[in-house]
Amino acid sequence: MKNEFYALSFQPEALEQLDQETLMTAIRVEAHVLDMIMQRPSAPGAGAHTRLQNFRRLTQCYSQRFGDVQPDLQWALRIAALFQTYLESAGQASYPYEPLLRPEIREADFRQLVATRRSVRAFAGEAEDRQLEQIIAYGTWAPNSCNAQALRYVVVKNPEIRRQLRTRGNHSIVAVLADLRFYSDGDIECPCHDTGAAVQNMLLGCHVLGLGACYMTDLAINGEKYRTLLQVAPYEKITALLWIGQCQQQALAPVRRQPAEVVRYL
């Protein structure tokens, strides 16, 4: 199916028509591509110089219109400088890898975190705003398609909207939306993949903070009723709802299948 909302254009004559968010997303995506090229042990392709030239048009346009203090832009300019060195060395320049950061978390602790998380549907109170902000921050660190960072989050606080969403219980509601303008033409799968990765981060974050959460997703949540209530733009798609709140108990843990039951080796 065609993604009719895809709007990114890297043609010079179109840059002035892009708003700040769209232009920065284009910069993030293109910088991501340059970064990937440099990590491959091979000589630059035939279009590498043109790609860098077009990328610099993006960054120059952004700097002239919106300034150059945005952290994303500073990262992108560093990638452009590294890519210039990569081209000048015909691909022989060493990529500036950073030391692998290993978190100080024992494997047993991580396993406990993952294995004891449950979907919670009985809540004793809402999450605090600072907790929701922290949980959403965990979601933004999830891997996403081409570093477009195209997910948006709606925290539902209006009592009337909550009532019409027919939620039961005293819990917070966070909707996850995908901005379809930033997914490739024809790509309707990646928004769901990005959402799944972000939501898993958020669910584990809830568990760490001592909160319960439930992940809701089906075709109905992107229907007309939900879209109207959540004031969703035409180019946005509701991909998930999360119930988050205080809890004192959780449901019985289901038995999980063993790896030997679900793995095939070829």
Image (cartoon, helix red, strand yellow):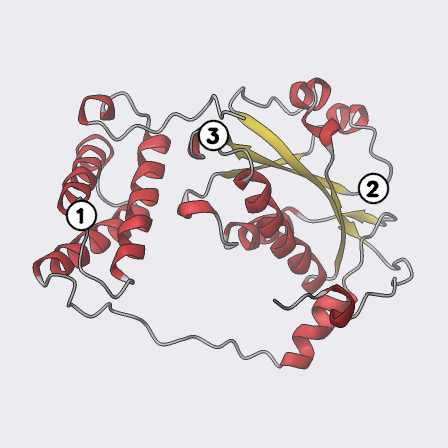
Closer to the chain start, of discs 1 and 3, is 1
Q: Is residue 71 visible?
A: no
Locate the C terminus and report the quarter of the image it occupies.
bottom right
Using the image, determine if residue 237 lies above or below residue 243.
above
Circle 2 Cα neighbour tier, 10 Å, few/some/many (<14 / 14–19 / ≥20): some
Specify whether 167 is left or right of 265. Answer: right
Using the image, determine if residue 128 lies above or below residue 110.
above
Please provide percent x and percent y for residue 145.
46, 46
Closer to the chain start, of discs 3 and 2, is 2
Q: Which element type, helix, strand or loop, lies under badge 2? A: loop
Specify whether 233 is left or right of 213. Answer: left
Q: Could you say which disc has been placed on residue 83 in the image?
A: none
Residue at the spot of label 1: 48
Residue at the spot of label 3: 186
Q: CA distance from mark 1 to mark 3?
A: 25 Å
Amino acid type of the residue tagged 1 in the rendering: Ala
Q: Which element type, helix, strand or loop, lies under badge 3? A: loop
Q: Could you say which disc has been placed on residue 170 in the image?
A: 2
Please provide percent x and percent y for residue 201.
61, 56
Closer to the chain start, of discs 2 and 1, is 1
Please provide percent x and percent y for residue 246.
79, 53
Disc 2 and disc 1 in contact, CB within 8 angstroms: no
Q: Which element type, helix, strand or loop, lies under badge 1? A: helix
